[in-house]
Image (cartoon, rainbow, N blue to C red):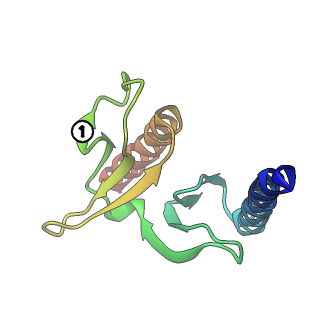
Amino acid sequence: MERGLFWLPLLAIFFWLAWQGSQEYQKVEAYRAWAEQFDRAKYDIYAVLGQKGDNITWGKPTVKGPIKLETFSLFDVKKIHLLVDDKVINIENPPEKGRTIELEFLFPEPQHSIRVPFTEIPLAAEWGKYLQGAWQNLQSEGEKS
């Protein structure tokens, strides 16, 4: 009897973990279908991000596909920052640890910014470098015309 009472919670934990794994798998599969439309895309537990040309789309992953999608143009961005623990950091020399990691897109309108969360600093830094390069190319093209 005692053995049964001991194994019952472990069995419940096993089924809960299996259900969680199934949910995460469904999120990844929904993301994969969504990401096909983009030139470059990323998935993590906090946010999905896709880039097609000068447009950036981001939202929250769910099992039915990304929700709360927001799209903006890099043409409209004034500056891109990498934030770790709400501090702007050097994208070329990021810290190894941090609790909150975000790419911040600042717009010309006062107090308007978009923050896209990331789970890993190296991934956020890589995206930040890439998008800063794309943004700078757009800015220089705009100045030429």
Left or right position of 119 against 7 = left
The spot of residue 45 in percent (x, y) is: 58, 55
The residue lying at 64 percent from left, 71 percent from top is 62
Q: Residues within 10 Å of mark 1 (few under 14, many from 20)?
A: some
Q: State whether residue 100 is above or below residue 90.
A: below
The residue lying at 13 percent from left, 67 percent from top is 110
Q: Is residue 130 visible?
A: yes
Left or right position of 120 against 34 = left
Q: Which residue corresponds to mark 1?
A: 88
Nearer to us in this view, 134 or 128: 128
Nearer to us in this view, 107 or 31: 31
Q: State whether residue 52 is above or below residue 143.
A: below
Q: How many marks?
A: 1
Q: Amino acid at mark 1?
A: Val
Q: Residue furthest front?
A: 1
Quarter of the picture containing the N terminus is bottom right
Q: Is residue 52 visible?
A: no
Left or right position of 73 against 77 = right
Nearer to us in this view, 57 or 1: 1
The spot of residue 48 in percent (x, y) is: 57, 60
Q: State whether residue 142 is above or below residue 71.
A: above
The spot of residue 25 in percent (x, y) is: 78, 60
The spot of residue 54 in percent (x, y) is: 49, 60
Helix or strand or loop: what does disc 1 sit on?
A: strand
Q: Quadrant of residue 61?
A: bottom right
Q: Quadrant of residue 24?
A: bottom right
The residue lying at 68 percent from left, 74 percent from top is 65
Left or right position of 113 against 142 = left
